[in-house]
């Protein structure tokens, strides 16, 4: 079963969040449509928080409550998380792993703290945990298929 066919309760259970928190995340992004493709409201273009490219410059842009990530940057984050000390540069930031010292840093997509997930990457003020990265991978592969 893929993430797009799960109910909000099932998604909450998968990520260890409350059902209410999942609703808050979904509503903060303008409903479930935002998580499925980064559709901006009011004619505004969204930009990837990791590389700065806007949604018309990328194949897929996924919007979360506090950040957006494009399909190219999901690949960069995978590379960074695969090896300790690895970084990836973009036109606007350097993507790096969030260390154990960054316990107070939280994922811009789900709100979990660094110590609540296996791994987290950051670029400037944007952060994404391995769990949300996996969900983004599923959204990208389902929508591009």
Image (cartoon, grey):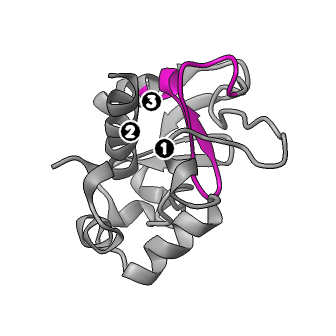
Q: Which residue is mark 1?
A: 36
The residue positioned farthest toward the left in the image shown: 1
Is residue 54 toward the left or the right of residue 59 in the image? right
Where does residue 140 sit, x and y in percent of width and height? Answer: 40, 31
The image position of residue 90, as x and y in percent, is: 64, 20
**For discs 1 and 3, the disc positioned in front in the rendered view:** 1
Residue drawn at x 83%, y 40% is 44
Q: Which residues are magenta?
A: 55-74
Real-space Cα separation, disc 1 to disc 3, in angstroms: 15 Å
Please say if the residues under marks 1 and 3 sit with CB atoms less than 8 Å apart: no
Quarter of the image with the C terminus is top left
| Viewer-proximal residue among 113 and 48 | 48
Query: Residue at 50% of width from left, 20% of height from top?
Result: 72
Marks 1 and 3, the one that precedes in the sequence: 1
Vertical relation: 57 (above or below) 115: above
Q: Position of residue 57 (x, y in %)?
A: 68, 17
- Residue 40 visible in the displayed image: yes
Q: Is residue 92 left or right of residue 95?
A: right
Q: Which mark is residue 74?
A: 3
On the image, numbered disc 2 is attached to which residue?
139
Q: Residues within 10 Å of mark 2 (few under 14, many from 20)?
A: many
């Amino acid at each position: 079963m893929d993430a797009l066919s799960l109910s909000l309760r099932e998604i909450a259970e998968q990520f260890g969040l409350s059902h209410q928190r999942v609703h808050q995340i979904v509503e903060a992004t303008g409903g479930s449509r935002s998580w499925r493709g980064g559709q901006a409201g009011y004619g505004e273009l969204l930009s990837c928080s990791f590389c700065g490219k806007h949604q018309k410059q990328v194949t897929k842009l996924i919007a979360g409550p506090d950040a957006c990530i494009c399909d190219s940057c999901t690949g960069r984050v995978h590379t960074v998380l695969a090896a300790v000390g690895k970084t990836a540069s973009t036109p606007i930031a350097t993507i790096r792993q969030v260390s154990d010292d960054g316990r107070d840093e939280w994922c811009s997509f789900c709100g979990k703290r660094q110590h609540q997930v296996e791994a987290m990457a950051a670029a400037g003020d944007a952060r994404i945990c391995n769990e949300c990265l996996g969900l983004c991978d599923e959204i990208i592969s389902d929508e591009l298929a």
